[in-house]
Image (tube, rainbow, N blue to C red):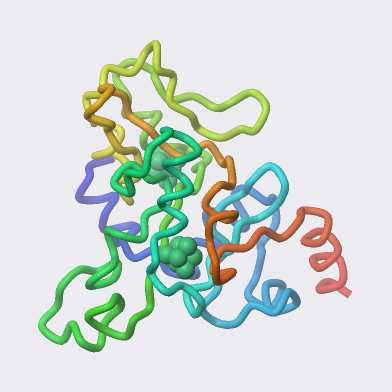
Amino acid sequence: MSKGLINKVFDKETTRREFLKLTGKGVAGFAVTSSILSMFGFGEEAMAAIALPEGLLVVDRSKCTGCQRCEITCTLQNDGKVQPFLSRIKVGENYNFGTTGPKINYQYEDGQMGNLKMSPVTCKQCREPFCANACPNGAIAADARTGARVVLKDKCVGCGVCTEACPWNLPTIDTENGYATKCTTCGSCVRGCPTDALKVIKWEDISKAHFFSKR
Ligand code: SF4
Ligand code: SF4
């Protein structure tokens, strides 16, 4: 699939519906609907973002201040340094103008130049991962324990094809070591967030909510 087509399909704007379709249904095995999220106190700005081993990571944009602490804790945990550019959760890219970039009426759009709604974006651990499928060296594979799509350093040559292939450009090349890096579902970003904009709902609680929503 060409990059242009991918971008057309996903439109870079990972809307609530797209998040739910990709992660709620694709990863959790059933639809995590807005009514299920509301059972956990989330409002309209909340999006099911990624399946962690312990539960579903939910991003609540209404609580994100754009402080980028999640990015800092991510790189401290995974890279041993503070380097938000490398972060596997990306707030900075959407910081000024939101996910759709500058527009003529930007003051009404997302980001600190608009309505102050920040959009932290994380890897969706796609079932059919564009990054892994595009890698010419087979250097991105599913982790046997977590299922996360992880970079195999002994195979990665840092070419950046995965970055280009991902609809959100999430894999990032660390120019200091020459390897691509991407989310491994470690959950560090959640622990770093001071405002609860990132929260994990345990799988057992989601199962219960799903059960009761069907009654
Ligand atoms: S990095 Fe790979 S698995 Fe993650 S969202 Fe992008 S294409 Fe999907
Ligand atoms: S740490 Fe929380 S509030 Fe700060 S940028 Fe990340 S998600 Fe937003």
Foreground residue among 67 and 29: 67
Quarter of the image that includes the N terminus: top left
Q: Is residue 1 left or right of residue 57?
A: left
Q: Is residue 18 visible?
A: no
Decide: is 164 above or below 116: above
Foreground residue among 198 and 27: 198
Quarter of the image that includes the C terminus: bottom right
Q: Quadrant of ligand 1?
A: top left
Where residue 69 appears, as percent x and y from the top left, is 44, 58
> At 86% across and 63% down in the image, what residue appears?
208
> At 33% across and 42% down in the image, what residue appears?
86
Where residue 176 appears, as percent x and y from the top left, is 24, 26
Q: Is residue 24 visible?
A: yes
Q: Quadrant of residue 47?
A: bottom right
Decide: is 121 above or below 155: below
Where residue 56 appears, as percent x and y from the top left, is 66, 55
Q: Residue furthest front?
A: 81
Foreground residue among 23 and 45: 45
> At 26% across and 54% down in the image, what residue appears?
7
Where residue 57 appears, as percent x and y from the top left, is 61, 57
Q: Is residue 190 left or right of residue 99?
A: right
> At 34% across and 58% down in the image, what residue appears?
10
Foreground residue among 31 and 171: 171
Q: Quadrant of residue 53?
A: top right
* Count of marks overlaid on the render: 0
Decide: is 188 above or below 140: below
Q: Quadrant of residue 190?
A: bottom right
